[in-house]
């Protein structure tokens, strides 16, 4: 693993930083308050290659690597976590499975408009009664004589669900086979049989639209099956591994924003005749923040490097996601504490960073699931 970034990686980082600082950060408070989907900002990210960073150029993407994705995600997340959530779903959860398992026709139809920022993609695995236990899903896809599938069921907590044009859907095609009975489908939300529920009111990442989606006799044609029948669970787990690199990057961006605000504050804020940054207790918090940030970054870059080398990275992605998400929660907590009453006030973005950080410990696999993944890899026991 190289510790020096390439010219291309630094270029995409610079583009992401510029957009985040000039467009996203100034509008973050507004979108958090009203909970609206930031259409124009997302389109701008797409126009600059940030909605398909690892997507090859022939499918409308930037054609860069996983480490470039990490660097860009951190910058966007530092501007606003909700924007980076939308970016993460498009880059990781939606396109990864398509690029690996999709046919040429599927890549042209379903990847290009997403990578170019012309449309939004979503990933539908979770159901009201099945979150971490994906094999307990009740959404059913029944194969017909002509090879098509009739789909019925609900999916919940679908990020970008209210605005998505296409959805990667996982449904049970052979219930008796458990994980091997799950198949992945490409869903066009404009087709009959697809419905959306209300947009969820969330604690954080409020500009990232989330809803329940429902299928009522939705018909999927044979060419809308992603991969092979029964491969859905394998596709989903592989996609989630890649997604965890994105969420680790998001957590780092949130934490870095809180850390940088705190550095400024402890230099300027005075108490008892001196900057509070001179107090040993404050200095200890700053040191711990910095250590957690650096450790999270290096672990995330390691997972990204393994991914782009086509080496196994499941455990490393879980380690990065667990470390970075818990670091983000801890760092934003300490940032609010150091700022005191101002940290608790909506006049400053610290309370938003704190609210946004929490979700990184939950989606793409909870911290408990990450520990399970890591422990099983270490012990070889299930």
Image (cartoon, grey):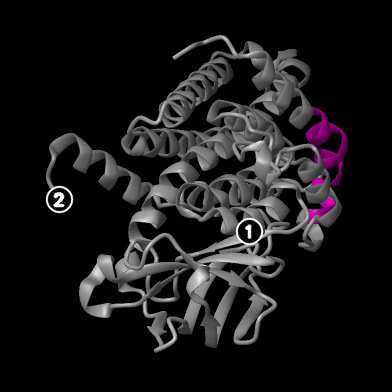
Residue 338 visible? The answer is no
180 lies above or below 74: below
Q: Residue at x 62, y 14 (%)?
A: 6
Q: Secondary structure at mark 1?
A: helix
SS assignment for the magenta stretch, majority: helix
Classify residue 146 by image quadrant: bottom left
Residue 190 visible? The answer is yes
Q: Please give the label number shown on residue 110.
A: 1
91 lies above or below 227: above
**Do residues under tags 2 and 1 come within 8 Å of each other at their CB atoms?**
no
Quadrant location of the N terminus? top left
Q: Is residue 293 left or right of residue 24?
A: left
Q: Is residue 24 within the magenta segment?
A: yes
Q: Residues within 10 Å of mark 2 (few under 14, many from 20)?
A: few
Q: Secondary structure at mark 2?
A: loop
Q: Residue at x 74, y 59 (%)?
A: 119
Q: Please give the label number shown on residue 201.
A: none
Looking at the picture, tell me which residue is in the foreground, 183 or 145: 145
Mark in front: 2 vs 1: 1
Residue 187 in picture, x, y percent from top left? 58, 71
Q: Please give the label number shown on residue 382.
A: 2
Residue 351 in picture, x, y percent from top left? 68, 45
Q: Is residue 281 within the magenta segment?
A: no
């Amino acid at each position: 693993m190289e510790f020096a970034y390439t010219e291309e990686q630094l270029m995409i980082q610079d583009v992401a930083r510029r957009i985040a600082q000039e467009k996203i950060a100034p509008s973050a408070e507004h979108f958090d308050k009203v909970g609206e989907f930031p259409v124009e900002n997302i389109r701008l990210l797409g126009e600059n290659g940030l909605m398909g960073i690892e997507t090859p150029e022939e499918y409308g993407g930037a054609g860069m690597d996983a480490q470039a994705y990490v660097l860009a995600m951190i910058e966007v997340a530092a501007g606003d976590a909700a924007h980076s959530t939308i970016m993460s779903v498009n880059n990781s959860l939606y396109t990864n499975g398509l690029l690996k398992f999709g046919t040429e026709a599927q890549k042209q139809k379903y990847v290009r408009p997403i990578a170019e920022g012309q449309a939004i993609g979503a990933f539908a695995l979770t159901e009201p009664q099945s979150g971490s236990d994906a094999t307990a899903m009740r959404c059913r896809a029944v194969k017909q004589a002509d090879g098509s599938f009739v789909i019925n069921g609900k999916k919940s907590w679908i990020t970008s669900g209210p605005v998505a044009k296409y959805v990667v859907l996982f449904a049970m095609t052979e219930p008796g086979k458990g994980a091997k009975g799950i198949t992945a489908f490409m869903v066009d939300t404009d087709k009959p049989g697809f419905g959306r529920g209300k947009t969820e009111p969330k604690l954080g990442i409020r500009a990232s639209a989330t809803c329940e989606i429902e299928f009522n006799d939705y018909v999927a044609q044979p060419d809308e099956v992603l991969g092979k029948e029964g491969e859905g669970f394998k596709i989903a787990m592989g996609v989630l591994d890649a997604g965890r690199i994105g969420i680790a990057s998001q957590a780092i961006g949130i934490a870095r924003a809180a850390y940088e605000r705190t550095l400024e504050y402890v230099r300027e804020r005075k108490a008892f005749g001196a900057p509070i940054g001179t107090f040993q207790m404050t200095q200890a918090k700053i040191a711990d923040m910095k250590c957690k940030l650096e450790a999270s970054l290096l672990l995330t870059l390691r997972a990204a490097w393994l991914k782009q080398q086509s080496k196994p990275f499941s455990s490393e992605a879980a380690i990065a996601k667990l470390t970075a998400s818990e670091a983000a929660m801890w760092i934003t907590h300490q940032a609010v504490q150091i700022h005191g009453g101002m940290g608790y006030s909506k006049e400053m973005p610290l309370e938003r960073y704190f609210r946004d950080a929490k979700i990184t410990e939950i989606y793409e696999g909870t911290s408990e699931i990450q520990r399970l993944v890591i422990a099983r890899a270490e012990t070889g026991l299930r």
